Image (tube, rainbow, N blue to C red):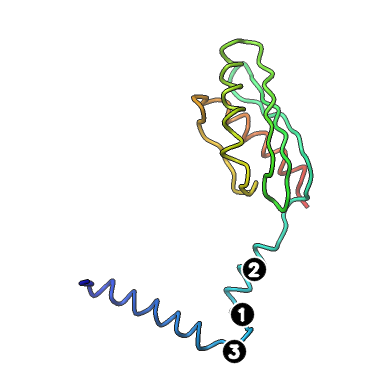
């Protein structure tokens, strides 16, 4: 394998860092990076529980009712209520509601923003608006 000077220098820097990290720490000691990463992972932002909020979207306005279960800041369950009366809107809401669990379950709520899904371009706006309210409800 042929490396350029730039990539060779980068690899030397990485291997030096790995060597220092492996040799420079006594057994059982953790680096500042390890401690920082662990404390971020262990820090809880939201209370566990089930939260419900309504998110408005569109010009009609339309809405979705979103119910999530949070466990350790992760969405472990989601349900989307579809209150639309217009048949076309109801169809989009139902398709969105059916597709959204596969996209959000198992993800941290603080990093979640849903985009166009199942052909529904407006429903994500309502879903994301409801998530903003749920984050506020669940905040520690």
How many marks do you count on the picture? 3
How far across and down, in percent of the image, does residue 33 sit? 57, 74
Q: Please give the name of the residue rendered at 73% of the width and 49% of the height, measured from the top-left corner.
A: 71
Left or right relative to 49: residue 61: left
Picture residue at 23% right of the left edge, 72% below the top: 3
At 66% from the left and 23% from the top, the residue drawn is: 63
Q: Secondary structure at mark 2?
A: helix
Q: Mark 2, residues whose alpha carbon is within 10 Å: few (<14), some, or many (≥20)?
A: few
Identify the residue position indicated by label 3 in the image: 26
Percent x, y of residue 111: 59, 48
- Residue 22 location in percent, x, y? 50, 84
Dot 2 or dot 1, earlier in sequence: 1
The answer to whether marks 3 and 2 mark residues whose Cβ atoms lie closer than 8 Å is no
Occupied quadrant, residue 114: top right
Secondary structure category for the residue under label 3? loop
Secondary-structure class at tag 1: loop
Q: Which residue is mark 2?
A: 38
**Can you say whether 32 is above or below 82 in the image?**
below
Q: Is residue 85 above or below residue 112?
A: above
Q: Label 3 near label 1: C-beta < 8 Å?
A: no
Name the residue: 57% across, 23% down. Answer: 95
In the rendered structure, find residue 88 and report the number of the disc placed on it.
none
Image quadrant assignment for residue 136: top right
Marks 2 and 1 sit apart, C-alpha to C-alpha, by 10 Å
Callout 2 touching callout 1 (CB < 8 Å) = yes
Residue neighbourhood size for the residue with mark 3, other residues' Cα within 10 Å, grouped as few (<14), some (14–19), many (≥20): few
Q: Position of residue 116 (x, y in %)?
A: 50, 31
Q: Which residue is mark 1?
A: 30
Q: CA distance from mark 1 to mark 3?
A: 8 Å
């Amino acid at each position: 394998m042929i490396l350029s000077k730039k990539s060779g220098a980068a690899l030397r820097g990485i291997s030096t860092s790995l060597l220092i990290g492996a040799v420079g720490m006594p057994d059982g000691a953790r680096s500042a990076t390890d401690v920082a990463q662990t404390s971020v992972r262990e820090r809880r932002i939201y209370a566990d529980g089930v939260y419900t909020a309504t998110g408005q979207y569109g010009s009609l306005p339309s809405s979705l009712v979103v119910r999530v279960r949070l466990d350790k800041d992760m969405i472990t369950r989601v349900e989307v209520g579809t209150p639309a009366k217009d048949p076309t809107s109801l169809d989009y809401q139902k398709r969105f509601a059916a597709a959204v669990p596969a996209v959000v379950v198992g993800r941290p709520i603080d990093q979640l923003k849903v985009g166009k899904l199942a052909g529904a371009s407006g429903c994500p706006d309502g879903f994301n608006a409801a998530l903003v309210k749920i984050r506020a409800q669940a905040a520690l």
